[in-house]
Structure formats: structure tokens, C-alpha cells
Image: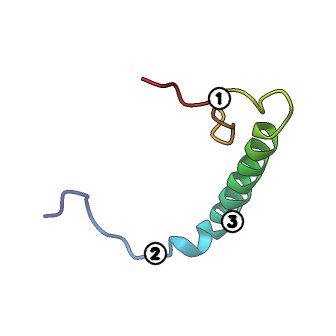
Amino acid sequence: MSLLGKKFPGALAKPMAPFFAAGLIVLYGVNSLQNALSNSQQYKNDPRNPNAKPAGKADH
């Protein structure tokens, strides 16, 4: 006996295709917005910004 229960035959990927496409579109939009905001003047020099230039290396 399977731990996941009985297997039922049925299509899964075909009816879910619009949701997969919508998810990719939303992820692309969020990524574009994040890149645009991280390059804006307000956050350009924020130390948490991965694209920010390092302030300089401290000598130890």
C-alpha cells in the first residue's frame, strides 16, 4: 500500500499550464521591478544592494 494513497489517472500538467505561464509572468515582473528599484537613485548606495559599489576595503 502506498503512503500517498491511491493513484488516479488524469492529466495534471495540461490543465495547469495557464497557471504555470501566469507564475512565470509574475516572477519576471517581480524580477524586473526589483532590478529597476535597486538601480534607482534612492537605493543606489544602500549597502544591502548587491549592485552597490563597495565603500573600500579596511586595512586590518
Q: CA distance from mark 2 to mark 1?
A: 57 Å
Query: CB of mark 2 within 8 Å of CB of mark 1?
Result: no
| Quarter occupied by residue 47 | top right
Give the mark toward the camera: 2 or 1: 1
Above or below, 37 against 27 in this view is above
**For residue 55, which numbered disc appears in the image?**
1
State the image quarter where residue 45 is shown.
top right
| Residue that carries the numbered disc 2 in the rendered image | 10
The extreme left residue here reads 1
Residue in the image at 50% along x and 75% along y? 11
> Which tag, 1 or 3, sits closer to the chain's start?
3
Question: Which residue type does callout 2 highlight?
Answer: Gly
The residue where tag 3 is placed is 21
Of 4 and 23, the residue lying toward us: 23
Q: Where in the figure is residue 49, as x and y percent of width and height?
A: 66, 34
In this view, the mark in front (1 or 3)? 1
Q: Label 2's element? A: loop
- Above or below — where is 16 with respect to 41? below
Does label 2 or label 1 sit earlier along the sequence?
2
The type of residue carrying mark 3 is: Ala
